[in-house]
Structures are given as structure tokens and as C-alpha cells.
Image: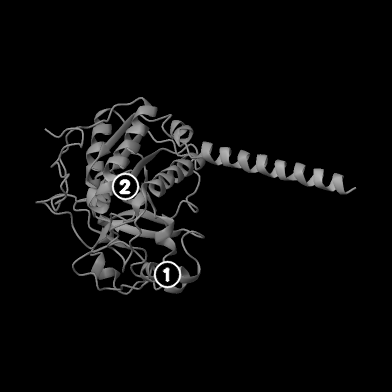
Amino acid sequence: MKRKIIITAIILFILIIISAGTVFVIKNFDLNPDKYIARVVQNAKIIDANIDHNQALDVIEYAQKQGIKSPSILINFDTHSDIYVNRRISKEKGAQIEDWINEYIAKNNNVDTVYWVMPKEEALDFLLRYDFGEHDGIDIAWGIPVFGNVFKPDMVRFLFLPLTVKPYTQKFLINPKNALMNEYVEGYEYNNLLFEDKTKFKEVTLITCTEETLPDFKGKDVFLSIDADYMSNSGFDTGEDFEIKKTPQELEKTFLSIMKTIDKKNIRPQVISLTLSPEYLPSKHHAHVIDLFERILIIAGLPDALLTYTRFNVHEEDEDYNGGKSFRHKN
């Protein structure tokens, strides 16, 4: 009897080891993003890896020249919203990395919906949840970047119901002539100051969410934009104090998560913009991110669409700065 118990225990131990080994193998297999990338890029016609995020505008203009109409939906994986309220696009500098989406909406009349996919770590940070729901009111005379709520005092909602549980939808009006954009709230006492003549403004919906609350896009045409600072989550400067420095392994895990999410949500874009954003990415991560971007291009079987750009970040001081050129076009 005692012998049977010992044998049974040994068998169970062996089965546990085998099972654990199987799980380990499965998990390791799942660390390979290639199968997800292959499905994500199956409809892609244009993929561009660029340095500054306003160069996404060059990408969409190039796509239009190739006969691809601008999709009505923009999905932007980014630590920042890249939207400004109460500020016109500068005639001298043009759209910059912090407000390029304003110009994208203003210049493309059919664009009516923007999804800002925020990193989970950012959405769950307590101080940033406070900032996200803070009531900024009319204190926007000089223009501010969009970070969550602008006018409605919904602070309590974000403290107890973060974006990982429920996305947040806002209605904005934008002047197509100068990309001046503000949140529109029915009955808001300062609407007349923000919108002198609402008939001149175009309506757009901004949905801020995380990978968990991003909806399904099956059958929908989207413009997909991915900023590398989403993977590092470092240098966040719109909220209070947010900095998470990831290891290269953690960065690659985030990249895998992005690809799995895009695949799961049935996002099959024709046009994809991949942005390095070197000033918001630790320099030690630059080469690794470029390798990940190239991996997407290789699996898609497409060339990097653009080597030169009409736009760049005029405040760029990074050592990798390449003034309007791709990181593949150094000379």
C-alpha cells in the first residue's frame, strides 16, 4: 500500500513537471509577435517608420497620392493625446508632434472619430487619474494639450472607474480653416467664448481608452498610428509625474501586447505609421524599437514608404535628430 502511494506520488510529480514544461513552451511560443503582425498587416498597402509624430501627416498625404482615401477613423497608440484645444496651427511652424491630429482632422473632412489608446500603466496611475478628470474650465487662454476631461467635472468617475474598465467619449468642434479645436458640452456657460460661430466648426468624437476597452473594428477602415513612447511609457509630460523605465524585454512584451490587441480587435489598416519619438524614448531603446518596426515591414513585405518628410519637430534636440529625413536616410 505504501509502495503504491509512493509510486502514485512520483507519477503525479512527473505529470506536474511535464505540465509546467508544456505551459512554459506555450508561453515562450506566444512571445513571438510574428503571427499577430502577419494578420494585422494583411491589408496594408503603405507602412512608414518615421522619427517625429507629425510626420504621420506626410504618410497620409503620400497615401492619398497613391489613391488611398483617408479613413474616417484614426487609432493612435500613444502616451500623449497629440491634440491641443484652443490653439490654432502655427502658420510658421505648421503642425507639430503635440497637435498633428488637429491638422489631420481639419484637412480631412471625412475624419470624424479618433481613438486615443493610452498605456494601461498611465490609465491606472492614481495621480494621473485625478488629472484626467480634473475640471480645467475656462483656464485655456493660451491652449492646452488634451489630457482627458476639459470642461465636465467628472473627476470622481475616473478615480473609481478607470479607462481600463470604461472608455471616455468626448465631443469636439474644430475649425477646418485653422484647426482650432475645443470640447463642446451642451449648455456650457462659456460655449459662446469658445465657438463664435458653431456653423463654421466640424464635429469630431474623441474616445480615450486602453487596450482593454478598445472596441472591435471588423470591417472598418482605419488609419493606424503607433508611437514608440507607448512602449516605454517614459517622458510623459502632460500629467503630474509619470515615468516608467522599462527593460528591453518589457518593451518587447508591450510590443507583443499591442500586436495581439490590434489582431484581436480586427484592426486591418491599409495605412500604418510607426513613430520613434526619440525625445520620449530612452536612447538605449532606439535601436531595439527600430528593429521592431523593421520586423513589421519585413513580415508585410513592404518597403518603408518615405525616406524624406516635409515635417519634423522644430524643438528636436536629440542626438539622432535627422531634420525631415528617415532614420534610414542619414546622409
User: Outermost residue toward the front?
Assistant: 3
Residue bearing mark 2: 227
Position of 4 compared to 161: left or right? right
Residue bearing mark 1: 126
- Which residue is nearer to you in this view: 114 or 160? 160
The quarter of the picture where the C terminus appears is top left
- Amino acid type, residue under disc 2 in the picture: Asp
- Amino acid type, residue under disc 1 in the picture: Phe
Instruction: Categorize mark 2 by other alpha carbons within 10 Å: few (<14), some (14-19), many (20+).
Output: many
Q: Is residue 106 visible?
A: no
- Which residue is nearer to you in this view: 99 or 318? 318
Q: Position of residue 68 (x, y in %)?
A: 31, 31
Instruction: Check disc 2 and report its element: helix, strand or loop.
Output: strand
Query: Could you tell which of marks 1 and 2 lies nearer the N-terminus?
Result: 1
Q: Position of residue 11 (x, y in %)?
A: 76, 41
Position of 139 compared to 167: left or right? left
User: Outermost residue toward the right?
Assistant: 1
Q: Residue visible at 25% across and 66% down?
A: 194
Q: Residue visible at 39% across and 69% down?
A: 133
In the rendered image, the vertical position of residue 129 relative to residue 68, given as above or below: below
- Which residue is nearer to you in this view: 200 or 224? 224
Q: Residue visible at 33% across and 43% down?
A: 110
Q: Position of residue 183 (x, y in %)?
A: 32, 63
